[in-house]
Image (cartoon, rainbow, N blue to C red):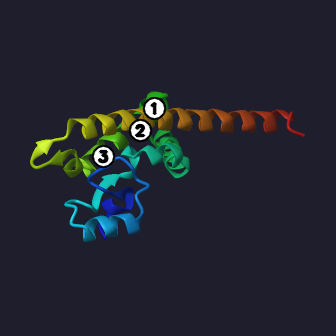
Amino acid sequence: MGVSNLFKTTVSATSPLDGSTSAATIAALKKGGEEGADQKVSDFLTVQSLANFGAVTGGVNMAWNGLSTLKPEWFAGIGTPFGMAFLWLVASLAMSHDQFYKDNKIQWSTLVGGLFVGFINALVLASAVLGAAAGAKNVVSAVAGGSLG
């Protein structure tokens, strides 16, 4: 298994942005002869990814903190989480590139759907990182000021 497979989910060709397709359904589609029954797409582009942000939010937050420590004048601003989130979108699109084509033709509905979900996910991810950072600062300030007990 390649590293990129860790960030992908199996989907059916008939529903390439739905990561909820079960292994049994995929097996039945393959048995029935459906071409491309077990395609892979980046988790970030599936509708289900809207609920899977805990690990990615923490990872981007820690990376932002690390970069801010190394070079604060470059990375301490709020643009950094947005840049990192959109880099994640670009990587996700690249990992899922093959799923946007059928019969050597681009499937615009799949591409536009993936771009839309990915764009929203990037905004939510960056906002979650900023919110987590602000919440942590508030807690630290409250503890330092003695207002938390």
To which residue does mark 2 refer?
Answer: 85
**Pick the front one: 135 or 15:** 15
Residue 134, position as x, y percentages in the image? 63, 32
For the residues carrying marks 1 and 2, which lies nearer the camera in this image? 1
Residue at the outermost right position: 149
| Number of numbered discs overlaid on the protein picture | 3
Residue depicted at 29% across the width and 64% down the height = 29
Which of the labelled discs sits on residue 91, or is there none? 3
Tell me the CA gap for discs 1 and 2.
7 Å
Residue 71, position as x, y percentages in the image? 44, 37
Q: Secondary structure at mark 2?
A: helix
Residue 48, position as x, y percentages in the image? 46, 48
Which of the labelled discs sits on residue 59, or is there none? none
The reply to whether discs 1 and 2 touch (Cβ–Cβ < 8 Å) is: yes
The reply to whether discs 1 and 3 touch (Cβ–Cβ < 8 Å) is: no
Of the image marks 1 and 2, the number of the one nearer the N terminus? 2
Quadrant where the N terminus sits is: bottom left
